[in-house]
Image (spheres, coloured by chain):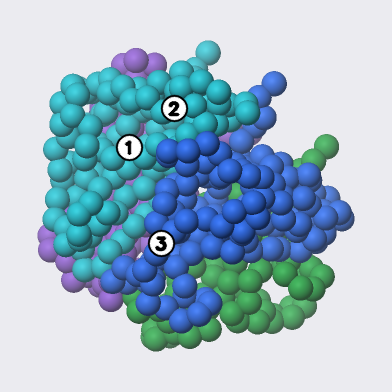
Chain colours: A blue, B green, C purple, D cyan
């Protein structure tokens, strides 16, 4: 099957919550992206993180296999450095082959378990 | 009326929840898509499912009648095979005529009934 | 100021909830669209409703004044006919001048007050 | 790194809730936008607010530094005038360099802490 989607994605409203009352690991508060790679080749996904008060960090490199889905939790990425909780961040994502990316958050520290989901914003590279 | 929308759609962050505390059938935890076919002809909707750890499954074929809405629950599709609960999946959707698709999830197993809704991502076929 | 946005919009996953436990009128369960008209002229907004089991109903015609926002509750539209509660519907929206439309739902009948919000899907008229 | 995103954005369904039961400042009910500026130059962000029953107010001008994220709470903007709570509004956003914007709301006055998140609508300037 062909590759579908885009190679450049971004979201701006990231924040990994600190408190949580859920059971491990499904209900731990987290931010995550779900990456769908429909193509016949592995996708190299590069994440670059932006912050309010320091220069960008990255890139983080993750492989999503051909014809597979992969969920990436921002709680889990550690190279070049682990992310701080309770800190606002944005993310720019570049891939080697077109993919479809959805961004979602679960906050189990508030009074209700709230999960949100957004299609990340597919960005066009500037000419 | 003319067909409106797109013929290729996808979402990546699917997962049918297992637990639920709702009444049947409205508050059973589920993932679903709402497909709007404004055109004068029936739309043949083909679903192809992607997983984290096995090859894609499908296609599932569903008809949406001309000038009608149809909601499709992923809990209910069984041919070629029923879907497992509590398992991450992505979905690529191809239709015979342009449609508008919205993806939503209800999880009644958490402490609060949470329903989320996202416009699925309209993908352009590659040239 | 110029008109911004699109003239054709649609969403597919509409449903006005029946039960509610909120106070009038803010917390009555409802579906609504928020229409932003930045232009110098009034926008004529036409709604056409689609259902699962009958032909489309409409059009409903509503004016959004120049340089104003207007919220339209689907509970309130009555001409050509009032909408039934607890019934799935989709909506196609055509305007006389470009506008920006956001679709949101509040369901106060569930255990938690849940409000969802989605940008409706801007559709391109077919050539 | 290059600028990514768009220079014109809008959302229509703004409303700053009045009641809240959260702790300061994280759980105060609010509307906010998260603006990601990946470019090498500061972005000048201009906000223009639209209402149901009066002419537009603005512009509000805010700087987002190069290669930084900035969250802007509508509760906090005061020049040319502070915003009223419990009042519907829409927002048109113009920037001097392309950015990525996400709009989210937290309402802690309802029975559950509900947070919603939407990608704002990137609008194309008319020719």
Mark 2, other Cα within 10 Å: few <14 / some 14–19 / many ≥20 = some
Alpha-carbon distance for marks 1 and 2?
Answer: 13 Å
Give the labeled residue for mark 1: D72
Q: Quadrant of the C terminus of chain A?
A: top right
Q: Position of residue C61 (x, y in %)?
A: 33, 37
Closer to the camera, C99 or D50?
A: D50
Determine the residue positioned at 83% across, 37% down: B127
Could you say which disc has been placed on residue D49 in the image?
none
Q: Position of residue A26 (x, y in %)?
A: 52, 76
Q: Nearer the viewer, mark 1 or mark 3?
A: 3
- Would residue D12 appear left or right of B59 to someone viewing this image? left
Label 1 or label 2, whichever comes before in sequence order: 2
Determine the residue positioned at 28% across, 40% down: D73
Q: Quadrant of the N terminus of chain A?
A: bottom right
Q: Nearer the viewer, mark 1 or mark 2?
A: 2
- Identify the image quadrant of residue A57: top right
Chain ID, mark 1: D
- Would residue B83 appear left or right of B55 to someone viewing this image? left
Label 1 sits on a secondary structure element that is: strand
Give the labeled residue for mark 2: D65
């Amino acid at each position: 099957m062909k590759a579908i989607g885009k190679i450049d994605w971004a979201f701006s409203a990231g924040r990994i919550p600190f408190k949580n009352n859920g059971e491990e690991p499904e209900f731990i508060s987290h931010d995550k992206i779900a990456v769908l790679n429909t193509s016949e080749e592995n996708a190299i996904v590069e994440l670059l993180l932006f912050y309010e008060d320091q220069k960008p960090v990255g890139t983080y490199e993750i492989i999503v296999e051909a014809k597979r889905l992969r969920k990436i939790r921002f709680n889990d990425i550690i190279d070049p450095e682990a992310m701080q909780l309770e800190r606002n961040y944005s993310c720019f994502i570049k891939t080697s082959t077109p993919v479809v990316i959805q961004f979602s958050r679960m906050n189990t520290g508030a009074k209700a378990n709230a999960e949100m989901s957004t299609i990340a914003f597919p960005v066009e590279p500037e000419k």
